[in-house]
Image (cartoon, rainbow, N blue to C red):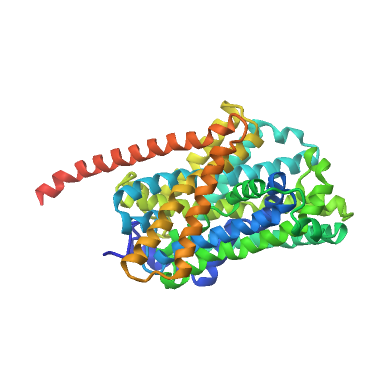
């Protein structure tokens, strides 16, 4: 069995000029891609509405579930070097049907993830400009123009190669952390931690806690995306597993602690947040911290969010190039730049598609930015449900074939499958208000279209190659 996926074809010039990522670099890019400071500002807030004082438990369940899924993915990452991440892994166990399902899901997922982070950054930027008197920045077309500028900047960084991407993304993510740490710590010192209410789960219900967990899952789903860089990583069978588990371990723990510290302050600042004040600014004001700190945190978060766009544009472009290498997309999308070793066509395909998608949503269809962000969050979760279930079952089957099953791995695959299954079931049992309740069905329709398109492209490429094969 081959341990490599076709993926992007690096020519000699491109591969020789690009230094491969070490363990520190790939782990740093993985963590930076999820913009830890933005997660600290957002995860406790979105869990609070459903889980209340049980928000910390919702965050903990989310962390445990993603660690379990990560353990299943690591089973493959230790055995195979593949640039398609889960898409490549499941093919080694289940064959082509799994690659169609997972490939279609993740192609949509990377596009949506990229769109969501880009729009989040434009919202931060628009809010900052509005606070300075530029109310026009919150309009639909200004938001679309900011999205175009963000995607163009990210594409330019990604085009220059992984080394530039790592330096820029990690720097942007790092400069934002101290601000959020000060805000969260100041809030906790001001309000106290209310341990009796939080650990007593005062007013919280089990369905609410699991609903909060499902809402917060969008901030960790896609954590394994760095596996798409396996072909450009030193000793990938050792270093990719570290990168895969770094997000659920480090970020999962960070969000649990942040939620414990922030919930009392968020409850006290609920009126300000309802009036449109950002969570960091509201926490800072409630804690009596200097007014400029909340504004500065908003400004830094605006800039830092670019790290997430850069990270997922790197992952998504390698994934798209892998699809092209396997015949699911046009062959040109798999080509890499001779100097920088970047799948340039795939980079511009994803960036351009994300921009068109966002412009249609916020200008042509005139959805509010809040509704778009909420819908994209639901869609992100939907896009990773099938891949995570299939990879967990695949890890179980692979270990069973090798007679290497252990109790921890049985537990991990069961917990991963059950938790992701619950997320899906929760979306059915507790749908959001219309039209957001239609998002899962929109995803299923898009998945069918993507799989059909893959089949058509692959068939056409096989027919195009047939004459040359006969002539040989």
Q: Residue at 70% of width from left, 58% of height from top? A: 176
Residue 81 appears in the picture as rendered? yes
Above or below, 331 relative to 145: below
Q: For the N terminus, give its image quadrant.
A: bottom left
Instruction: Tell whether 388 sits left or right of 334.
Output: right
Between residue 400 and residue 262, name the one nearer to us: 400
Place residue 34 in its image quadrant.
bottom right
Residue 104 percent coordinates (x, y): 40, 44
User: Could you say which is closer to the camera, residue 190 or residue 7?
Assistant: 190
Kindly indicate the quadrant of the structure image that contains residue 150. top right
- Residue drawn at (76%, 57%), measured in percent from left and top? 200
Q: Is residue 228 left or right of residue 181?
A: left
**Residue pictured at 43% horizontal, 71% vertical:** 406
**Spot occupied by residue 84 in the image (x, y as percentages of width and height):** 39, 56
Residue 66 x, y percent position in the rendering: 54, 58
Question: Image height check: is 140 above or below 231?
Answer: above
């Amino acid at each position: 069995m081959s341990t490599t996926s076709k993926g992007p074809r690096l020519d000699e010039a491109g591969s020789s000029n690009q230094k491969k990522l070490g363990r520190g670099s790939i782990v740093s890019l993985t963590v930076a891609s999820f913009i830890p400071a933005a997660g600290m500002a957002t995860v406790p807030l979105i869990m609070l509405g459903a889980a209340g004082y049980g928000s910390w438990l919702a965050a903990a369940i989310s962390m445990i579930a993603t660690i379990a899924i990560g353990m299943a993915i690591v089973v493959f990452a230790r055995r195979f070097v593949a640039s398609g991440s889960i898409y490549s892994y499941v093919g080694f166990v289940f064959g082509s049907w799994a690659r169609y399902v997972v490939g279609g899901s993740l192609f949509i997922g990377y596009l949506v993830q990229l769109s969501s982070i880009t729009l989040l950054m434009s919202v931060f930027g628009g809010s900052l400009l509005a606070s300075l008197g530029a109310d026009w920045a919150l309009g639909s077309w200004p938001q679309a123009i900011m999205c175009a500028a963000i995607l163009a900047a990210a594409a330019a960084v990604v085009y220059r190669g992984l080394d530039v991407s790592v330096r820029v993304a990690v720097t942007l993510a790092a400069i934002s952390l101290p601000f959020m740490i000060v805000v969260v710590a100041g809030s906790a010192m001001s309000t106290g931690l209310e341990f009796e209410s939080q650990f007593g789960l005062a007013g919280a219900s089990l369905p609410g806690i699991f609903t909060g967990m499902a809402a917060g899952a969008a901030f960790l789903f896609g954590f394994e995306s760095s596996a798409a860089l396996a072909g450009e990583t030193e000793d990938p069978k050792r270093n990719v597993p570290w990168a895969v588990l770094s997000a659920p371990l480090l970020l999962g723990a960070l969000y649990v602690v942040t939620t414990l510290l922030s919930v009392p302050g968020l409850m006290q600042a609920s009126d300000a947040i309802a009036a449109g004040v950002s969570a960091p600014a509201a926490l800072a004001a409630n804690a009596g911290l200097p007014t400029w700190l909340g504004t500065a945190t908003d400004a830094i978060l605006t800039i830092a969010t670019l790290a997430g766009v850069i990270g997922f544009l790197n992952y998504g472009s390698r994934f798209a190039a892998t699809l092209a290498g396997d015949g699911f997309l046009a062959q040109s999308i798999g080509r890499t730049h001779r100097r920088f070793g970047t799948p340039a066509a795939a980079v511009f395909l994803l960036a351009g598609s994300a921009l068109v998608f966002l412009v249609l949503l916020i200008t042509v269809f005139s959805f509010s930015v809040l509704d778009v962000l909420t819908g994209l969050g639901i869609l992100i979760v939907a896009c990773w449900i099938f891949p995570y279930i299939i990879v967990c079952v695949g890890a179980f089957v692979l270990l069973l074939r090798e007679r290497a099953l252990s109790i921890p791995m049985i537990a991990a695959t069961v917990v991963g499958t059950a938790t992701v299954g619950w997320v899906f079931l929760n979306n059915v049992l507790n749908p959001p208000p219309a039209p957001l309740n239609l998002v899962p069905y929109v995803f299923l329709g898009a998945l069918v279209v993507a799989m059909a398109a893959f089949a058509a492209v692959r068939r056409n490429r096989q027919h195009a190659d047939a004459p040359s094969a006969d002539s040989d």
